[in-house]
Image (cartoon, rainbow, N blue to C red):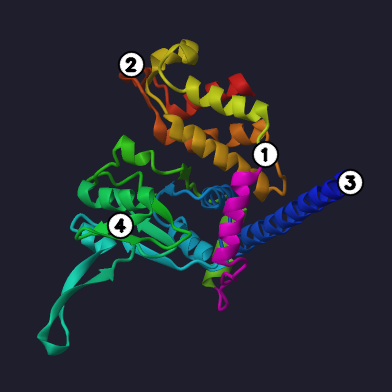
Amino acid sequence: MASASGESLEKLEDMIVRAAESTAANVRAAKAAIGEVIFGQDVVVERALITVLSGGHALLVGVPGLAKTKLVDTMGTVLGMDARRIQFTPDLMPSDILGSEVLEEGQGGKRSFRFIPGPVFTQLLMADEINRASPRTQSALLQAMQEQHVTVAGARHDLPKPFHVLATQNPLEQEGTYPLPEAQLDRFLMEVDVDYPNLEAERKILFNTTGAEETHAKTAMTSEDLLSAQRLVRRLPVGESVVDAILQLVRSARPGPEAGDMAKLIAWGPGPRASQALMLAVRARALLDGRFAPSIDDVIELAEPVLKHRMALTFAARAEGESVPNVIKRLKARIG
């Protein structure tokens, strides 16, 4: 009897490993498919995929013309998700994002309200130049991101699953913008810097986008496959040393005794949501690499995009030329 139960346990473990292997293969195929369309942005593509696999939202920061919009369109196609884009402007209203109630007259002259869903009712939403909209409109989107539903005229409307927001922000044009408050920045799992491509990548972009034939994205996964991958990410085992590294890193990024000599540089630091984000992100990165358990290297690699928008330096530290990435680098050295 004992051997029969042992065999069934082995079979179950074997099934789990096979499911994990096929999911990991799907995820790697999706990454390769995105790489065929988006050149020279391997780190950005990897971090955007990690964010989606973790079930979160990402803030993409970069100057115009670096294929941020194309990345979102491509990810939507490759991952089998319905994708939409909203261009944020100062006159954009919350109802332009969430939707609104309209009064309709039916048969017999009876009037009733009908809800018309806004563009937020999609699986992958690009919020272009999110810092151009008023705080009220930003809050409407960020509340939907956090709660996965919207409330209009007292009625609740659930958002589709999966639901992810990739928001963009232009770091140069600050005139007429409304910077996101710290509490709202915390809703983004990662802040991803989108930099200029290198020479070889830019050469490839030139030939691919100005010729007669342009490469188009191909579907590699369905939204159901993505939901399965997200469930798997949450089930991946995390070793005690990795958990300790996450806690040590996040806690030392706050002002207080655990920061040691860095405490005087930090004005405020990341809350528990940063630990949660890092825990999910390191699992997703491991899966993307075909591994079924994250390592301390994953923590070190993802520390900056997860922590950077969740902490600020004191005025004195900034006056001395310190920067948040430099402080994170020194904190990472303690666990590396």
- The amino acid type found where label 4 is placed reads Val
- In the shown orientation, is residue 146 left or right of residue 24? left
Where 232 sits versus 276, above or below? Answer: below
First of labels 2, 3 by sequence position: 3
* Residue lying furthest left: 109
x, y percentage for residue 219?
A: 59, 70
The total of numbered circles placed on residues is 4
Bin the neighbour count of mark 1 within 10 Å (Cα to Cα): few under 14, some 14-19, many 20 and up: few
Bin the neighbour count of mark 3 within 10 Å (Cα to Cα): few under 14, some 14-19, many 20 and up: few
Q: Are marks 3 and 1 in contact (CB under 8 Å)?
A: no
Cα–Cα span, label 4 and label 3: 52 Å
| Location of mark 2 (residue) | 316
| Location of mark 4 (residue) | 150
| Location of mark 1 (residue) | 237
Give residue 3's mark.
3
Q: Determine whether the residue tagged by mark 3 lies in a helix, strand or loop.
A: helix
Image quadrant containing the C terminus: top right
First of labels 1, 4 by sequence position: 4
- The amino acid type found where label 1 is placed reads Pro
Part of the protein shown in magenta: 211-237
Where 183 sits versus 257, above or below? Answer: below
Determine the image quadrant of residue 311: top left
- The amino acid type found where label 2 is placed reads Ala
Q: Residue at x 20, y 54 (%)?
A: 90
Cα–Cα span, label 3 and label 1: 26 Å
First of labels 4, 3 by sequence position: 3
In the image, 81 versus 336, the foreground residue is 81
